[in-house]
Image: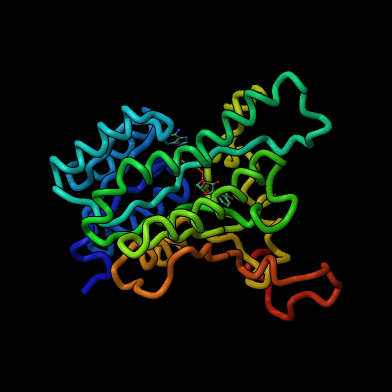
Amino acid sequence: MQILDGHVVLVTGGGSGLGLGVARHCLSEGAELAILEYDPAKVIALKEEFGDQVLVCQGDVRSVEDLQACRTAITDRYGRLTALIGAQGIFDGMVPLADTPIDRIDALFDEVFSVNVKGYILTARIFHDLLASERGAIVLTCSTAAYAADGGGLFYTASKGAVRSVVSQLAFEFAPEIRVNAVAPSGIANSQLRGPAALGMENSKQSDIPKETFRAGFRTTALMDLPTPEDYGVLFAYLASRHNAIMTGQTVVADQGMLNRAVISSIGTGGTPAVS
Ligand SMILES: NC(=O)c1ccc[n+]([C@@H]2O[C@H](COP(=O)([O-])OP(=O)(O)OC[C@H]3O[C@@H](n4cnc5c(N)ncnc54)[C@H](O)[C@@H]3O)[C@@H](O)[C@H]2O)c1
């Protein structure tokens, strides 16, 4: 038996990075799958990779119309939905507030919060009744930026803090029909997380950073490596599944032990580095 046998799962922002890795894992665990993705080029790549096996919807999580069209496509094809996995997000460019042009703050706040927070709220609202009738699950994507400074700039960090609160409130409001949790990664390999258009950084991506340079930042974690999107799949799949009968309202910190350290001492972690 596979963990997602009999489940219908929607992954929003499943066109690359974490969402794509989680979507692949859900499929391998027996789920019937739908993916909502904004970027038309990624939509084409998804259709090439999955063919008719997966329902791929092109759309924007900020658009009620797009979400309703995706909902209709899901009910037409599968008749139901048992889990919503929210994996979309954008970065804020990590510009310190004091260096952020005052006349860009409105646009930057609206851009980052509309994708990273409002997108999750709208999706939860639009799929609520389908999920409730299946006693389903919502799994959102938070970040260690919600717990400690320097995981992003102010706008990204604040948006991920808001995701923690969204999880807490929705788990309360949607209980007992829907379990609502989140996963907070520290870093993800092969991510294409983009910067904000409000600062003219929409074409800069995490994948522009040389892989080894990005990985080096994770040597100070206890597990001394940077996970791939697929590594997170098992945790998302569990939280999305009916096997999770014990958790709601929780954000699971999946950070390779990054936050379990008070200072960067010279002692190290005592292990053998997984990255060279
Ligand atoms: N990259 C990291 O190191 C890291 C660390 C912690 C948390 N996260 C979080 O993980 C999640 C996934 O990010 P990723 O790193 O895999 O980046 P990614 O850019 O590779 O994946 C995000 C996907 O969301 C899509 N998307 C963006 N805006 C959208 C919209 N309005 N509507 C629909 N889809 C949209 C993108 O096109 C992309 O395919 C995000 O929430 C991010 O904040 C990332």
Farthest residue, direction bottom: 270
Number of marks in the image? 0
Which quadrant would residue 135 be assigned to in this image?
A: bottom left
Quadrant placement of the C terminus = bottom right
**Residue 210 placement (x, y as % from top left):** 65, 44
Which quadrant would residue 264 be assigned to in this image?
A: bottom right
In this rendering, the answer to whether 269 lies above or below 29 is: below
**Residue 63 placement (x, y as % from top left):** 39, 29
Taking 109 as reference, is 76 left or right?
left
User: What residue lies at 55% left-to-right and 58% top-to-bottom?
Assistant: 184
Taking 50 as reference, is 85 left or right?
right
- Depth check: give the residue in front, 138 or 183: 138
Taking 190 as reference, is 3 left or right?
left
User: What residue lies at 71% left-to-right and 41% top-to-bottom?
Assistant: 153
In this rendering, the answer to whether 105 lies above or below 94 is: above
Farthest residue, direction front: 173
User: What residue lies at 29% left-to-right and 60% top-to-bottom?
Assistant: 136
Quadrant placement of the N terminus = bottom left
**Residue 72 placement (x, y as % from top left):** 20, 36
Farthest residue, direction top: 103
- Depth check: give the residue in front, 258 or 97: 97
**Residue 235 placement (x, y as % from top left):** 43, 66
- Depth check: give the residue in front, 84 or 248: 248
